[in-house]
Image: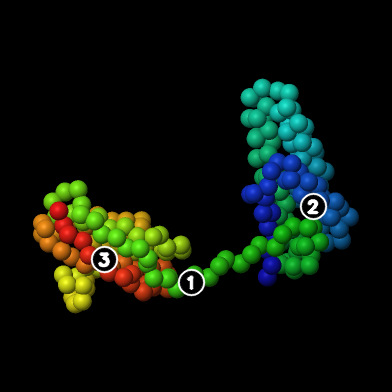
């Protein structure tokens, strides 16, 4: 089932005005959308006012920007209401939605298996027993799991709680002792592969 979408977030005020006028023209006289809510006349009047407010920025003071922004918010509220109306009246029919020139909402991107964490670096921390870890952030991750080993080969164990940032401070280690660390990124599908391990010496 298709759903309509405005996709106005990256448009300038001028381009929004043009797009809304296109939508009004395309919907006028439609046999599908016979009783638009809000009415096309109300949308047109609001857009006309937005255009006047936009033009007023060239000759008026700072208050004109506040007025323009308020009218833009009002217009977007009307258009969101119109999109909801189209969603109901179209019954999810893509052709009926596209007859208004509205965009079709893209389905959400399914989660992907996390890639291997890259560029893990371990540095001596600021305080005794501390090590600072950092790595390249992984897009789409929900959390990271850090593991520690005394020799980098055996007895890998989770270190602390999962973290959400691409860095962490490991505390409570034995001063001047070498440890090995690795990091994996996780999401709803689970953990991706571990990073290459990094060696660091606690302060």
How far is the residue under mark 3 from the one under mark 2?
57 Å
Q: Nearer the viewer, residue 133 or 104?
A: 133
Q: Residue 86 occupies which quadrant of the picture?
A: bottom right
State whether residue 127 is above or below residue 99.
above
What residue is shown at x 15% (from left), y 64% (from top)?
Answer: 178
Label 3 or label 2, whichever comes before in sequence order: 2
Quadrant including the N terminus: bottom right
**In the image shown, does 144 or 177 lie closer to the viewer?**
177
Res 114 visible: yes
Q: Residue 23, labelled with which disc? A: 2
Secondary structure beneath label 3: strand
Q: Residue furthest right?
A: 29
Q: Which mark is residue 198?
A: 3
At horizontal 36% and vertical 74% (from top left) the residue drawn is 193
Residue 103 relative to residue 192: left or right: right
Tell me the residue that label 1 is attached to: 112
**Mark 3 nearby-residue class (10 Å; few <14, some 14–19, many ≥20):** some
Image position, residue 91 (x, y; %): 73, 66
SS category of the residue bearing label 1: loop
Above or below: residue 135 compared with residue 67 = below
What percent of the width, then of the height, locates residue 102? 74, 57
């Amino acid at each position: 089932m298709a759903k309509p979408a405005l996709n106005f977030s990256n448009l300038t005020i001028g381009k929004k005005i043009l797009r809304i006028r296109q939508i009004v023209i395309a919907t006028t006289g439609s046999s599908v959308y016979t009783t638009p809510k809000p009415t096309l006349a109300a949308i047109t009047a609001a857009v006309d006012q937005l255009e006047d407010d936009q033009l007023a920025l060239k000759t008026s003071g700072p208050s004109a920007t506040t007025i323009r922004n308020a009218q833009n918010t009002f217009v977007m509220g009307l258009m969101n209401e119109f999109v909801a109306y189209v969603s109901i009246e179209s019954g999810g029919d893509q052709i009926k939605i596209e007859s208004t020139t509205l965009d079709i909402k893209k389905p959400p991107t399914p989660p992907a298996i996390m890639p291997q964490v890259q560029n893990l670096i371990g540095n001596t921390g600021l305080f005794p027993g501390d090590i600072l870890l950092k790595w390249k952030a992984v897009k789409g991750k929900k959390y990271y799991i850090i593991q520690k080993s005394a020799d980098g080969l055996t007895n890998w164990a989770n270190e602390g709680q999962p973290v959400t940032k691409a860095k962490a401070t490991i505390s409570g280690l034995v001063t001047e002792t070498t440890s090995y660390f690795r990091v994996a990124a996780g999401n709803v599908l689970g953990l991706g592969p571990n990073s290459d391990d990094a060696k660091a010496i606690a302060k």
